[in-house]
Structure formats: structure tokens, C-alpha cells
Image (cartoon, rainbow, N blue to C red):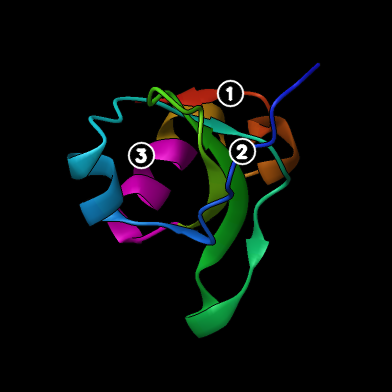
Amino acid sequence: MAKAKLINSKINGDFVKENHVTELKIQSIPDFGTYQKLECEVQCNDESKTKGKWTISKQPNNALIKKWGDDTDNWVEKLFQ
């Protein structure tokens, strides 16, 4: 039997620091959301494997484009450190 896990509605810097998250696995195709920033569903590598929404700020956005290109369809299932 699988145990249900709480889903954090928003993954932010405080959550990442408090839970020692070092990687995010992109679970959905990033699309423009609030404030014209890309948003996507991610899974963290914390102890609970927390899932939630990540609003991608300028610095990670630019790093993702440099790493995987500007076609966000190709970002799904990739690990961001």
C-alpha cells in the first residue's frame, strides 16, 4: 500500500533551504503563469519527495535555457541542481 504525501502548493527558496533540497525534477511542461514567469510541477529530492509548483525566476530560467534549450517540452523529467 502506498502512503499519500502532502503536496506543497509552491516550492520556494525557504522550502528548499529548510528541507535541504539539492535537486528538482521537472514533472510538467513549463508554461507562462503569474507575472509572465514560467511555472511547472516539480518533485524535490527531500526526504518526503515533495511535489509542488515552481515559479522559475530569472536566474534559473536562464540556466535552464543554456542547459536544455528554449523548447520547454524538452525539460520534462530533467533534474535541475
The span shown in magenta is 56-65
Amino acid type assigned to the residue bearing label 2 in the image: Lys
Q: Residue furthest right?
A: 1
> On the rendered structure, is 32 left or right of 28?
left
Q: Is residue 5 above or below residue 30?
A: above
Q: Does residue 39 belong to the magenta stretch? A: no
Q: Within 10 Å of the Cα at label 2, are there few (<14), some (14-19), or many (20+) other Cα atoms?
A: few
Q: Which of pointers 1 and 3 lies earlier in the amino acid sequence?
A: 3
| Residue behind mark 1 | 78
Q: Judging from the image, what secondary structure is the residue with disc 2 in?
A: loop
Residue at which label 2 appears: 5
In this rendering, the answer to whether 54 lies above or below 42 is below
Q: Nearer the viewer, mark 1 or mark 3?
A: 1
- Is residue 63 part of the magenta span, yes or no? yes
Query: From the viewer's perspective, is the residue at label 2 or at label 1 nearer?
Result: 2
The residue tagged with tag 1: helix, strand or loop?
loop
Q: CA distance from mark 1 to mark 3?
A: 13 Å
Looking at the image, the residue that sits furthest to the bottom is 35
Give residue 19's quadrant in the image: top left
Question: Looking at the image, which residue is at 81% across and 16% down?
Answer: 1
Q: Main secondary structure of the magenta part?
A: helix
